Image (cartoon, grey):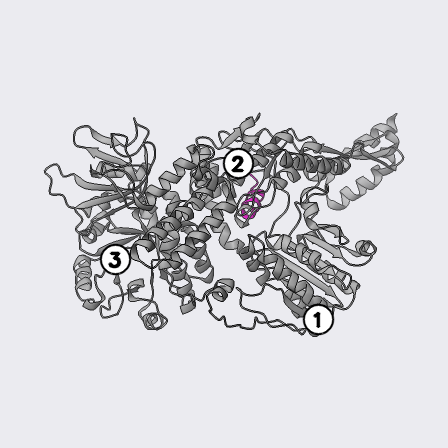
Amino acid sequence: MVSVAPCFPASNLDASLQSGLYVLGRAFVVVSSASDVSLVKDFLSINFGIVDVVAVISWDAVSVDDIIGLLDAGLEAVSVPEKCVKPLVDAGVPFTRIIVPGSSYDSAAVGVTVSSTDNGISELASKAAKTLIPDLGPQTVFVTFPESATVDSITKITTLDSTIAVIPFQLLSTDVVSSDNKISVAKIIASSLTSDRSDGLFTTLVVDVHDTALGLVYSSEESLAHAISTRTGVYQSRKRGLWFKGQTSGAVQNLRRVSSDCDGDCLKFVVEQTGAGFCHNETFSCFGGSSGLAGLEKTLLSRKKDAPEGSYTKRIFADEALLKAKIMEEAEELTEAKTKSAIAWEMADLLYFAFAKAVRDGVSLEEVERNLDSKSRKITRRKGDAKGKWAEQNGISTEKSQTPKVVVAPAPSVEDNKGKIELTRVDVSAISDAELTELLRRPAQKNANILNLVTPIVEAVRSRGDAALLEFTAKFDKAKLDSPIIRAPFPEELMQLDDETRSALDLSIENVRRFHAAQLETEPLVVETRPGVVCSRFARPIDSVALYVPGGTAILPSTALMLGVPAMVAGCKNIILASPPRADGTLTPEVVYVAHKVGASMIVLAGGAQAVAAMAYGTESIPKVNKILGPGNQFVTTAKMLVQNDTSALVSIDMPAGPSEVLVIADKTSNPAFVASDLLSQAEHGVDSQVVLIAVDLITEQLQAIEDQVHEQAMRLPRVEIVRGAIKHSRTFLVKTVEQAIELSNRYAPEHLIISIENANKYVDAVKHAGSVFVGEWSPESCGDYSSGTNHTLPTYGYAQVYSGVNTASFMKHLTSQELTPEGLKNIGPAVVRLADVEGLDAHGNAVRVRLSALEKK
C-alpha cells in the first residue's frame, strides 16, 4: 500500500479535502477535546468514503462510549494509549480497529506507532513489525514523524514492508514542484514503489469508484506528481511522454485515491470516469462493458433520460405509487421464494425496482455502497427486531417499553420509538420554574463544530470562485454542471407546470403581493421637533438581494415566492435566487416559475455554505449582493452568520435560523383531528423540528383523543420516520387556564402559534412573542405557509422575542434627514454647543458656533 498518511488536528480536518491530500486515502486526526469528537463525527457524516480517518486520542477524559461513537460514525481505526485497549476490547471493539502508540510490542492491537527521528528508526520499525502477536494476522506499523522530518528519514520508512509514515499535513505538498520547506507527496509514494522495468515505470491499474477495472497503464514520479496536483488521471505514455487522460477526447478522470499493492510494484488509481469511457475505442473499459449493479445503474440512467413515452421504465419513473407497489410486491415474492433459482430471480427483480427508485430520486450506486461500508464499521449493533405491522403480519410479538417521562400527568403507556407516536406529557403544576425553563429549551445546535466545517468551504469559494462552487455542487448535490447559474429570461421548458399548480402559485403570489404592498411606506415621516427644525425618515429599497431556497428533504417553491414577492414589491433592482440542483442539474419547475414571476435576474444552482459564500463575495458569474435572506440547515445558517460578521463582505442577513416549530394551544372545544394535523404539519419538516401542544384543562379522554389522532394521521404520512424523529423531543404541557397557556407560549416564543380555542381572537392582544399567529380552528398554519398572504419566513429557535418575520421592510433600509432654518439653529444650537463641550469635542461645538456668530452679524 502507499506508505504515507497526513496527520491533522481535528480543527483542520477539512484541510485534507482542500489540499488534495485525500488522494492518499487515509488521514490521521488528533482528537484532544469533546468538541473534536463531534467535529470528527460531523466530518465523517459528510465525507465517509472519500478518505479513511484514524483518530489519535490525546484527550485524557475520553470515554469508551466516545470512542465507540467515533467508530460507529465510520472511523477506520483509533489510536489509544495501551491502558485503553482492554476496556475497548471488552466493549466489543475488534483488535483490527485499534492502534497502540509507543514501543511495547506485546499488545493485542493492529499495530504500533513509533515516534523517533534517530538513525535507527528503520530498524526500530522493522523490529516492531516482527514482534507483534502473530495470531492477529497481518500487522501494520505506523511511524509518526515530527515537523522537523526530512525526506531521507521518511523514505527509510516507506521502503519497509507493512509500515506507514504518518506526517504532519503542513509538511506535505501536492504541487508538481515542491517548495523548499515542503515534502512532495509524489516523491514519497514513488520511493515506496519498485519496478522491474528497464525504463523504471510503475505498472498502474485504473479502476472506477466501484473497483471495476478500466485499464492498465504506466506511471512515473513526474506523472504521479501531475496527477496528484491536478487531481485528475495523468499517466506516463511509453511513446508520447506525459499523458493527460481526456485532454483531447474530453473523457477526463477525476482522481479519487492513489494506493499500491502489498508488494509495492503496482499502483492503483481510483477515478471517476467522465465522457465516453476509458478506452480509446470509446467504451467504458478496456476489458468490456459494465455488468452487475453498476451496469444496472447505467442502464436505468440511460432509460430515465431517453425511455420513450408509454414504456414500462418510463412509467415507473413517472408513477411513484406504481414504483412503490412494485418494490413491495417483489420484496414479498423474494420472502416467499424457496429454490436457489427462484431466490436469485426474485432478488434480481427487487434490485431492479429498488435501483429504479434510487435513480429516480438521484441516489447513486456509490452512495448506496458508502452506506453499506459505513454500516459495516459500526461497533454498536442494532437489536434486529421486526417493526410494527411487519412483525404482526408474521406472528412476531413485540415487547413494549415505557418511554421515560419528565413528569407525569396520568397517561397510557407507549411503545418504543417504532411504536405509537405521541408527545411526552408534562404537568406544569407538578414541576419547578427552573425545570419548566429547561423543558422549554430547543434541541441543541452544534454551531461551533459546524463553523469548523463551514469556514473552509466559504474561504474556498471566496478565493476560487466558480471553480470551487462547481466542485462543492458536484460533491454535495451530486450534480455536475458546466455553469453555476441560469440567467433570465428563463427557458420555457424549465417552467412546465400543470394548470392546477400554476393557478395555485399565481393565487398565492397575488395574495402575498397584496399584503406586502400594503406595508410599503409611500410617504416620508416628517416631524418638526422645534420651530425651524424639521426631521424626516424615508425608505429606500436595498439594491441587490439574494434569496436562498432550500432543497433537501422537501421542495420549497413557497419559500421562493415568500422571499421573491416582497423583494419585488420593495423595488430591489437585482433579485437572485439560489437553490441546490437535483442530481441531473435541474431545479423543480415551480421554483423557476416563481423566479420568473418575481423578476429574478438569475438562479444560482448551488446550496449550502457554498451558495451563501458565492452571493456574499461574488464570483466570476455571480454578482455580490447586499443582503441574503432565506431559511436553511445549520450549514446555511452558520455561513450566513459568518459572512455577516466579515466586514470585507459588507453583507447583511435576515435573521438567525433554526429548525421549524409550532406551538398549538387547545382547549375542550378543540377538534382533536385539527390539532393533530397542525402539529404534524411542522413535525414533517425534519427530525430536528419541534412541536409543542399546550392543553388547557383537558381531561384524560380529551387528551387521549388528540394523541390517537397524532398517531393515526402520522402513520398515513410518507414522511412518518421524519415525524417520529421530531416527536421524540416534542412535548404536551398541561395547564389549567388560557392565561397560563399564553404566558407559556410567550416564554417559548414559537415560530408559529396556533390558538385553536373558543373565542381565540380575544387572546391575540396578549401574545407578545411569536413569528406568526393563527387564530381559531379554521386557520391552519399551512395557509400561512402558502396562500393567505402573510410571510412564512419567520424567526425560529426563540428568536421571535427579538426578530420579526420577513416583510417588505426586510428589503428596504430607512434614511433620516434634518433641515434647519436660522430660527431652528438658534432654538437648538446652544444645547448642541453645551453637549459638545461636555464630551470634549470642540470641533462639533465650533460647527454651530461659527453659524450662530454669522447670524448675530446679520
Q: Residues within 10 Å of mark 3 (few under 14, many from 20)?
A: many
Instruction: Answer whether residue 455 is visible to the viewer in this image.
Output: yes
In-front residue for pair 32/553: 553
Residue that label 3 marks: 143
Q: Position of residue 8 (x, y in %)?
A: 37, 53
In the image, the segment drawn in magenta is 637-648
Residue 721 placement (x, y as % from top left): 53, 57
Residue 650: image location, x then y, percent: 59, 37
Does residue 178 appear anywhere in the picture? no
**SS of the residue under disc 2:** loop
Residue type at mark 3: give it. Val
Cα distance between the residues tagged 2 and 3: 49 Å
573 or 704, which lies in front?
704
**Residue identified by numbered label 2:** 587
On screen, residue 854 versus residue 241, left or right, reads right
330 to the left or right of 401: left
Up-down relation of residue 396 to residue 53 (above or below): below
Instruction: Identify the residue at image location x=25%, y=70%.
Output: 107
Residue 208's image quarter?
A: top left
Q: Nearer the viewer, residue 49 or 522?
A: 49
- The disc placed on residue 700 is 1
Q: Residue at x 48, y 49 (%)?
A: 324
Q: Looking at the image, tell me whether mark 3 or mark 1 is earlier in sequence order.
A: 3
Magenta highlight on residue 97: no
Label 1: element kind: helix
